[in-house]
Image (spheres, rainbow, N blue to C red):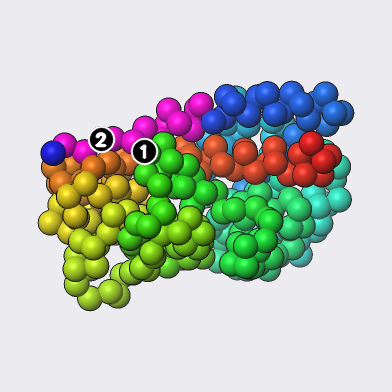
Amino acid sequence: MTATLIDGKGLAARLTDDLKARVARCEAAGHKPGLAVVLVGENPASQVYVRNKIRACERAGVTSIEHRLPESTTEAELLALIHDLNQDPMVDGILVQLPLPAHLSADLVIDAISPEKDVDGFHVQSAGSLLTGRPGFLPCTPYGVMKLLEEAGCDPNGKHAVVVGRSNIVGKPQALLLLEKNATVTVAHSRTPDLGAVTRQADIIVMAVGRAKMLKGDMVKPGAVIIDVGMNRDENGKLCGDVDTADVMEVAGAVTPVPGGVGPMTIAMLITNTVEAVERRLGL
Ligand code: GUN
């Protein structure tokens, strides 16, 4: 068997294009959606992510409002900016690119964002809403993973899903979203002994542990659907995921590539959440 590659890049482009009609409805109701993008410091990876997010805004017809701040920005300065953005009627969503420089508390800054504008879904209230099944913004990467499963024709209902990774941004919310769709969910992580014994039970594997090419073909049940959230460099400095893609191809049913899988979907869901923020506020 050779696995199907799930085209995240193509799906993200389609979803972003589909947002244009919703953006037009917002504009007809008197408001063009706006996303504030806050980048502190010079982290090169963050600069690439931010550029891609701004491009996706352009594609969907969403206004992006950039705030690039120096590494030396104080917590008080950043909190004052967040406060201003919370009050700004042109701003529907606020994105603070992570990681922040070490002297700034991400928790403090994220929780200063108004939950109505928390389009990254990282605010503690958004996390609580997800946990308790109440309306709120879903974190973009796990939300995008659910769309990728749908694209692959994989309904989690009744399936065994193994999530490898337990971060607040991906692993934990991913497990909740799969549970919500009636999967039986196991969360494994970097300290799980004999990871292969766990992943071999899985119909769905979501790898979000941050270890280059960790998932091998002999750790996969034939036909399993594998979503690779990893973004690492291999021994030659080449971008790779947490999945040894070439190795699992002969066993898995479907797998997302890196790049071109989850990454573009995270951005598409960010723009989706931004448009959703306007629709909720205007009652559209
Ligand atoms: N850094 C890595 N991933 C993300 C993300 O999804 N959102 C933000 N704000 N920062 C990140």
Please report the residue visible at 62 percent of the width from the left and 39 percent of the height from the top.
272
Q: What residue type is labelled 2?
A: Thr
Numbered disc 2: secondary structure: strand
On the image, the x and y values in percent for residue 217 come to: 15, 52
On the image, the x and y values in percent for residue 142 come to: 48, 52
On the image, the x and y values in percent for residue 95 come to: 65, 49
Please report the residue visible at 34 percent of the width from the left and 57 percent of the height from the top.
159
| Chain-order first, disc 2 or disc 1 | 2
Q: Taking 93 as reference, is 154 left or right?
A: left
Please report the residue visible at 53 percent of the width from the left and 40 percent of the height from the top.
267
Magenta part of the chain? 2-14
Q: Taking 283 as reference, is 122 left or right?
A: left
Q: Let me know if residue 141 is in the magenta part.
A: no
Query: Image quadrant for the N terminus?
Result: top left
Q: Name the residue under label 1.
A: 152
Disc 2 vs disc 1: Cβ atoms closer than 8 Å? yes
Q: Let me know if residue 6 is in the magenta part.
A: yes
| Residue 213 visible at all | yes
Q: Residue 4 carries which label?
A: 2
Q: Residue 3: which quarter of the image?
A: top left
Q: Distance between the residues labelled 2 and 1?
A: 9 Å
| Residue 214 visible at all | no
Up/down of 8 relative to 146, above or below: above
Please report the residue visible at 19 percent of the width from the left and 55 percent of the height from the top.
220
Q: Residue 205: which quarter of the image?
A: bottom left
Q: Taking 278 as reference, is 216 left or right?
A: left
Q: Taking 243 as reference, is 231 left or right?
A: right
Q: Residue 208 carries which label?
A: none
Mark 1 residue crowding within 10 angstroms, few (<14) / some (14–19) / many (20+): some
Q: Which amino acid does label 1 sit on?
A: Ala
Which residue is nearer to you in this view: 18 or 57? 18
